[in-house]
Amino acid sequence: MWQVNAVAPIANLLEPTTGVVTVNGKTAAQSRLDQDYGMAFQQAGLFDWRSVAKNIELPLELKGWDKEKRAARAQEMLELVKLPEFADLMPWQLSGGMQQRIAIARALAAHPPLLLMDEPFGALDEMTREYMQGELLRICAETKTTVVFVTHSIPEAVYLSNRVVVMSPRPGRITEVINVSLGENRSEDTRAADNFFAGITAVREALRGTHADHANAGAIRGVEDR
Amino acid sequence: MAFVNRLRNIAVPFVFGVAFLAFWEGAVKFFELKPYFLAPPSKILSNFFSNASRIWDAASVSGMNALVGLIAGTIFGVAMSFILSRFRFLSSLITPLAIALNAVPIFVLVAVLNNMYSITSEIPRRIMVSLVVYFIVLVNVAKGLTQVKTTHLEIMRSYAASDIDILRKVRVPNAVPYLFTALKISAPAAVITSFVSEYFGGSQNGLGSRITSNIANSKNAAAWAYVLGACLLGLVFYIVSVVLENVASRGNGATNTTNK
């Protein structure tokens, strides 16, 4: 049911094969119960029968917040994702990119210290995708949230990350951890910077290495170069 | 433009209906068909109005049976679908039974039920209607409660939501459109079942029994007048269920299945 990737064991959706996953010093199960993280998936997964604001309020409802506090926080989150006037619309009235922004707003509504994202921009077109990457960097900087972000796109990984963890296909194992030296303030200009391309090359080589090892085991060959 | 389209949507079936009735009337006149063979629409209509109060009485008996059965069947169907979606093993026991029962023309059960209650009782007919409605509601609502998007369940799990929370916030809202679909199918089925149940004996007070008794007495036009009443009753049930669905889904994309 769940794609096997780094997010699943951290989110306590899967038990790790060996070893223990700790999230900020707690077990994964405990941190799930304490709601120490928010999650966003490839599909925005908004609830069709709830307005945009009510979707964002859902995690707060489950935490037992009262009505005024929830509404205030929902409005705050809508401003964070720059959609303040959309509170009363229904999810199906929004574009894919807007839906994904609402999903991020919902994931961050309870101000968790950690945000787990499983290919959240995978279903978006290229323009929207780059815009969303910039927005994610801004939102994380503003809210001081740590993000674990799963992607199949090398440029996306390098642009967003301080550290890129490369995983091998079948079996999914961590093969390399690459530090990205792009600094804190990234902009559209970063996409043309030399160390951005250096980062892409480093990640690509790490991926090639894993693929060469598994080429005969039927592993995926080409790497999506987006 | 929209107005013209709307007008056309109404006008075309209306003109066709009038032309069909005129053809029927003309055929009866032209071929001099005997009234016991086929009554002309004009005679049926005059019969309908002259018998209006009796047709109304019969319609309220059949309508009441359909309504009571519809409500009872819906309540039991919804209750059972909650139990089935909670305990999956029960579902594997009951689903084959439900399918088997649906394969039998279960109207015949009314003959059995008639033996269990007094001959003038409306209860067997109402039980019959609720049985038919029950299975339609059960199957649809159970589907709505169980066929929930995986992403929604994962999100609820990441919020550490309890089963009750998932039921209240995800499963029940997801099942609401399924309930209204079930009602839209059940409403005409309830009316039909209510008529057909009257063919198996009991009081001769409903539309179904009036149709048979008038045909038995060769009062063809009167029988047709009761058929017209039956059509109208079925329409009323259907229209009310459609209106209810529209009210329930107003401003909510649940019925807007073209999305995603």
Image: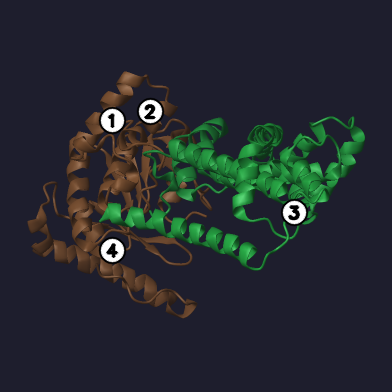
How many residues crowd mark 3 within 10 Å: few (<14), some (14–19), many (20+)? Answer: few
- Label 2 with label 1: CB-CB less than 8 Å: yes
Q: Which three-letter amino acid code belongs to the residue tagged 2?
A: Leu
Q: Quadrant of residue A178?
A: bottom left
Chain A tint in image: brown
Q: Which three-letter amino acid code belongs to the residue tagged 4?
A: Ser
Could you confirm whether marks 3 and 1 are on the same chain?
A: no
> What residue would you read off at disc 4?
A153
Above or below for B77 versus A166: above
> What residue would you read off at disc 3?
B99
**Dot 1 or dot 4, earlier in sequence:** 1
Residue in front for this viewpoint, B171 or B38: B38
Residue at horizontal 31 percent and vertical 21 percent from the top: A69
Instruction: Give how far apart the Cα atoms at labels 2 and 1 are.
Output: 9 Å
Could you confirm whether marks 4 and 3 are on the same chain?
A: no
Residue in front for this viewpoint, B150 or B257: B257
Q: Nearer the viewer, mark 1 or mark 4?
A: 1
> What residue would you read off at disc 1?
A74
Q: Nearer the viewer, mark 4 or mark 2?
A: 2
Q: Give the SS element for disc 1.
A: helix
Q: Which three-letter amino acid code belongs to the residue tagged 3?
A: Ile
Instruction: Give how far apart the Cα atoms at labels 3 and 1 are.
Output: 47 Å
Instruction: Give how far apart the Cα atoms at labels 3 and 2 are.
Output: 42 Å
> What residue would you read off at disc 2?
A60
Q: Give the SS element for disc 3.
A: helix
